[in-house]
Amino acid sequence: MKSISTQCKNKFLRNFSFYGELTVTIKKALIPAAGLGTRFLPATKSMPKEMLPIIDTPVIQYVVEEAIASGIEDIIIITGRGKRAIEDYFDDSPELEMHLAKKNQTDMLKLVRDISSLVDIHYIRQKEPNGLGDAVLRAENHIGNEPFAVLLGDDIIVNDKPCTAQLIENFEKYGRSTIAVEEVPYEKLNSYGIIKGRPLDDSLYVLEDIVEKPSPEEAPSNIGAIGRYVFTPEIFDCIKKAGTGVGSEIQLTDGIRLLSRSQMIYACRFKGKRFDTGDRLGYIKSIIDFALQNESLRDNVLEYLREILAVEKVTAEK
């Protein structure tokens, strides 16, 4: 098992101050990253969408950092054809390290070495895209009979207490599967798994039903599941029993729905800011937001945005 130095934690877990405060039993996490990324073609023809950079850091690193900050020690990344760059990124890079050492670029050398020592990572190939439920099933043998977390590879969620840690905390309290949810705009209801829930308080629901990508007219609410989950291992059998669903694919939502009929599931409104980097506009927003949080970039980016807005205002007034 790879260890994580204190310096490495401080460098990479920059968005999370909660690390180490929670005693957890959940040590394994699954990151599905086998999707084709068609919304970012042609770029994703040769680059995994999870490797698209937010300034200078690929999306998937933020997801891995969240898992580590939540106490996860063992990560399984589900990959597919054309995703080798993800494995290379988290692997050692002796040629690059040697080059940086010769150039005496010590800061960059440490940065490269820290990436490969973040956590113990395993890779499982999903031979063809067949739905999120199928991706989760690929990890069944590795997960075994343990509760585990699932973090989608294109959702970045920023908060002092990581979203996954919030779900684990609820799991520790109730011993039940917990999914992260948020309000979804009316026009996007057909892009999410939408829940029907019985509220327990302002941020927690008992899941009564969940529907995959309903039309706005058929949606049971405006509360949708996003890319963070904590499951009991019974989810595997439920996914298998549910079979194929929307799009003739094996949907995780259908497995969750079936699991809710045999054991209680909680839906948690997480605290934090979410960036859907699998969406082009969401990706652009994430770059702007992270640039504004970067002290070396903030002033210049703000000035550039003001220039753009001034030009747009003049153009609109003509």
Image (tube, rainbow, N blue to C red):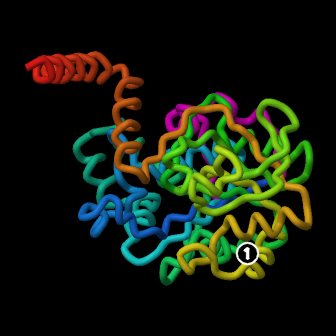
Depth order, front residue of 102/67: 67
Depth order, front residue of 150/4: 150
Picture quarter containing residue 264?
Answer: bottom right
Residue occupying image coordinates x 31% and y 59%: 40
Q: Where residue 267 sits: x, y (%)?
A: 77, 47
Picture quarter containing residue 304?
Answer: top left
Q: Where residue 317 sits: x, y (%)?
A: 13, 17
> Which residue ends up furthest to the left in the rendered image?
318
Task: Report how many numbered discs are placed on residues in the image.
Answer: 1
Locate residue 110 relative to residue 144 in the image: left or right. left
Quadrant in which the C terminus appears? top left
Q: Which secondary structure dominates the residues rendered in magenta?
A: loop
Q: Where residue 167 sits: x, y (%)?
A: 75, 44
Q: Is residue 89 magenta?
A: no
Depth order, front residue of 94/21: 21
Residue occupying image coordinates x 92% and y 47%: 174
Quadrant in which the N terminus appears? bottom right
Q: Where residue 135 sits: x, y (%)?
A: 60, 73
Give the residues in magenta.
1-25
Depth order, front residue of 314/89: 314
Q: Amino acid at mark 1?
A: Ile
Residue occupying image coordinates x 56% and y 51%: 189
Locate residue 32 relative to residue 276 in the image: left or right. right
Neighbor class of circle 1 (other Cα within 10 Å; few <14, some 14-19, many 20+) is: many
Q: Is residue 37 above or below residue 158?
A: below
Residue identifier under label 1? 239
Residue occupying image coordinates x 32% and y 20%: 298
Name the element at disc 1.
helix
Q: Is residue 213 visible?
A: yes
> Which residue ends up furthest to the front in the rendered image?
217
Q: Is residue 114 visible?
A: no
